[in-house]
Amino acid sequence: MAVLVEGLHKSFGSSPVLQGLSETFKEGKISILLGPSGCGKTTTLRCIAGLERPSAGLIYVNEQIVYQSDPHIWTPPEQRRLSMVFQSYAIWPHMTVFENVALPLRAAGRDFLQITKSVAETLSLVGLTSFAQRPATDLSGGQQQRVALARCIVSDSPVILMDEPFSNLDAKLRIAMRAEIRALQRRLGRTILFVTHDQEEALSIGDDVYLYREGHIVQKGAPKDIYENPATRYAAEFLGRANIIDNFEWQRTSEGSQAKLANGQSIDLIETVSPKSGSVLCIRPEKWRFTQVRAKGVIAGEVIETTFVGDRTEYRIDTAIGQISVTALNALERAVGEHVGLEVSPQDVKVVMN
């Protein structure tokens, strides 16, 4: 157990942000706190760091209680053995790269030789050895982010907190930094709690994803599992694009079960029992396959929009059950106005709560 919160409440004035949050974030893993603005993910991180005082609850860090509402326990941030990377980097502009990274060690009272050795090793780890004596303001955004990361690593804190650390970087740098974070975590074995609202970032970095909504965690799991098997419409739509079909009837057949659609056609399902009231169907755009229009069990439609985005083409297909989004990789190009057929495998049709 690296970090545990139990019954955590936090309000700002009369507005509750966290409402009885209880969760364990695994040791030695990258845990992604994902959700829209105002859902409570950053507040969770700041409560763990000691930058916000919760209204009630309990927080463990490395098997030590750092906050408890009753009886009251409060451990100051500097005594929690945590490091934090902020969205704004929090780099001191009047210091060199070496001096910025050395700050935690100087605060801990390390001697000059220890500081020099540790900082040199850490700068090598993040690829900034040649920048050690440069003023921090001379660095690019990506390099400043590495300085902030190096400052966390050098302190030897077992837990690192990251609050939207890539939001100020351009798209290419964001992708590069994702790979660096994963590589460093694998090498160092630290526990990382990483806050983001970017679902692609969450899926590419995390060992586990914790999806927030209005102060609660509504679903958690490995990135692939939570993407492939969303529990709710909210999860399906937040974790990527999803085609939602809300007008269907479940029916059992001699060969299994089906969802009978509004146009009278049916889609095979792997569900063996009738879905709960209020359920909808979720089909990811990449799960659809183009096929012959008149083939059995195929949904017929007309291409109304195509968008080429490099490694794939995205289509909007107008059908009798509504517009459907389809993503195709390296596929034959289809023109607007073309009539097409769509089919999907039963295992790719997910029944989720609305």
Image (cartoon, grey):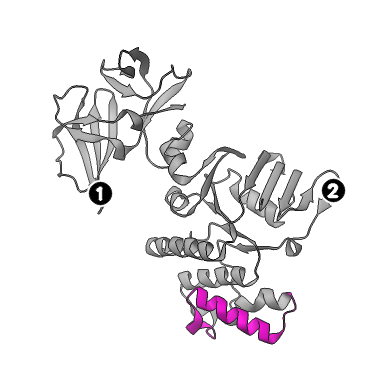
Q: Is residue 287 visible?
A: yes
Between discs 2 and 1, the one toward the N terminus: 2
The residue to which callout 2 is attached is: 72
Residue 23 on image: x %, y %:
64, 43
Residue 93 on image: x %, y %:
58, 77
- Is the stretch drawn in magenta largely helix, strand or loop? helix
Residue 146 to residue 214: above or below: below
The residue to which callout 1 is attached is: 312
User: Which residue is at 36% across, 19% downward?
Assistant: 247
- Badge 2, how many Cα within 10 Å: few under 14, some, many 20+? few
User: Which residue is at 35% across, 31% downward?
Assistant: 347
Residue 266 on image: x %, y %:
28, 19
Count all numbered tags in the image, as a single digit: 2
Residue 114 to residue 48: above or below: below
Residue 228 on image: x %, y %:
41, 38
- Badge 1, how many Cα within 10 Å: few under 14, some, many 20+? some
**Which SS class for mark 2?**
loop
Q: Give the amino acid at mark 2.
A: His
Q: Is residue 95 visible?
A: no
**Left or right: 74 in relation to 4:** right
Residue span colored magenta:
108-134
Residue 294 to residue 43: above or below: above
